[in-house]
Image (spheres, rainbow, N blue to C red):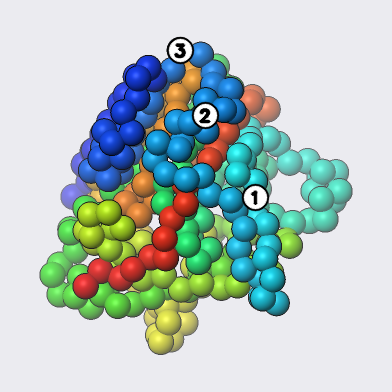
Amino acid sequence: MSASAFHAVVFEGADLDGDALRTALSDSGVVCVRFDAPLDDAHARAVAALIGPIKDPVGRARDGGALRYGEDRQIIDSGFVMTDDLREALGGGSLGGDDLRPGLFEQFHTDDSYTEQPAAATVLHARELPKSGGGPTSFIDMRAAFQLLEPASQKELIGLRAVHSYNNHDAFPPRASATGPLEALVDVAHPIVRAHPVTGEPALYFDLDRATHIEGMPLDEGRALLQRLQDHAEARGPRYAHEWSAHDVLIWDNALVQHKAGGDFPVGEPRNFWRYMIEGTTPIAAG
């Protein structure tokens, strides 16, 4: 059975209603707000704040201190090209993703899963796009993916927790692990079947870019289970592919969907966004 489609709810930028925006996000998992001009930082923040408070990306380090792992407005340059000279100057660290264009993540994942309170939502504002648009950002409905499992399989997953780390040490090849100073962040464990913080509905929740193992399960067995669940979601979960227009603000619910970038544009062309993450809560297991 091939993956069916779902759709983003589209709003026009003028006179946005926060209640309607939040309801659409919890219902569909993805919303798009269309603007006819680029936003300045204040306007972009105001749109993001309609969803919730913007997250200050500070996590807990292994030594017990606080560690900043980003800014509250992040510049996402998925067209940035990494040269050998730049790689040497940066000390050989990796963000994961594509080796040539390190800001480009072409595998399905969820944002911020390696933190104790992952971002509830991601807000991405298109600043500069390739001539072609740069390929879609694609989404899988992980709530529907859970419902498409057999009831016995659903029951077996309830209560299992996957451990996530900034650097998962190539646990799921060919995905590339992230390396560098942020490896000092503590490892965290989140339920594989997560109750949505607003609706309470269950959805599959994990990120193979960050997951290392399942608590209480042999390493290989746990990784094999996570890979099977990912394969199931990608094969059967409903999908939406967002074709970018200039100045779009795309918002997605990290408790409901996984996403991946499109890389269908020439190397060297710009594909730039501003990203704001919305404060989230500690993930709770579905019952």
Q: Residue 44 — which label?
A: 2
Near mark 1 (Cα within 10 A), the count class, few <14, some 14-19 or many ≥20, is some
Q: Which is nearer the N-term, disc 2 or disc 1?
A: 2
**Label 1, on which residue?**
70
What's the distance in space between the residues labelled 1 and 3, CA to CA?
A: 29 Å
Quadrant of the drawing holding the C terminus: bottom left
Mark 3 surroundings within 10 Å by alpha-carbon count, few (fewer than 14), some (14 through 19), many (20 or more): few
The image shows residue 125, relative to residue 150, as above or below, that is above
Residue 48 visible, this orientation: yes
Callout 2–callout 1 Cβ contact below 8 Å: no
Which mark is nearer the camera, 2 or 3? 2
Q: Which residue occupies 64% across, 24% down?
A: 269
Answer few, some or many: residues within 10 Å of disc 2's Cα (few below 14, many 20 plus, some between 14 and 19): some
Q: Are discs 2 and 3 less than 8 Å apart at CB?
A: no
Q: CA distance from mark 2 to mark 3?
A: 13 Å
Write the residue at 31% across / 51% down. 256
Amino acid carrying label 2: it is Ala
Q: Residue at x 54, y 21 (%)?
A: 39
Asked whether 255 or 211 is in front, the reply is 255
Please state if 54 lies on the left or on the right of 144 as rendered: right
Residue 207: image x %, image y %? Answer: 45, 60
Q: Could you tell me the amino acid type at mark 3?
A: Asp
Q: Nearer the viewer, mark 2 or mark 1?
A: 2
Residue 48: horizontal and vertical position, in percent? 46, 36
> Considering depth in this image, is 255 or 85 the residue closer to the camera?
255
Q: Which residue is mark 3?
A: 36
Say left or right for 74 vs 37: right
* Amino acid marked by disc 1: Gly
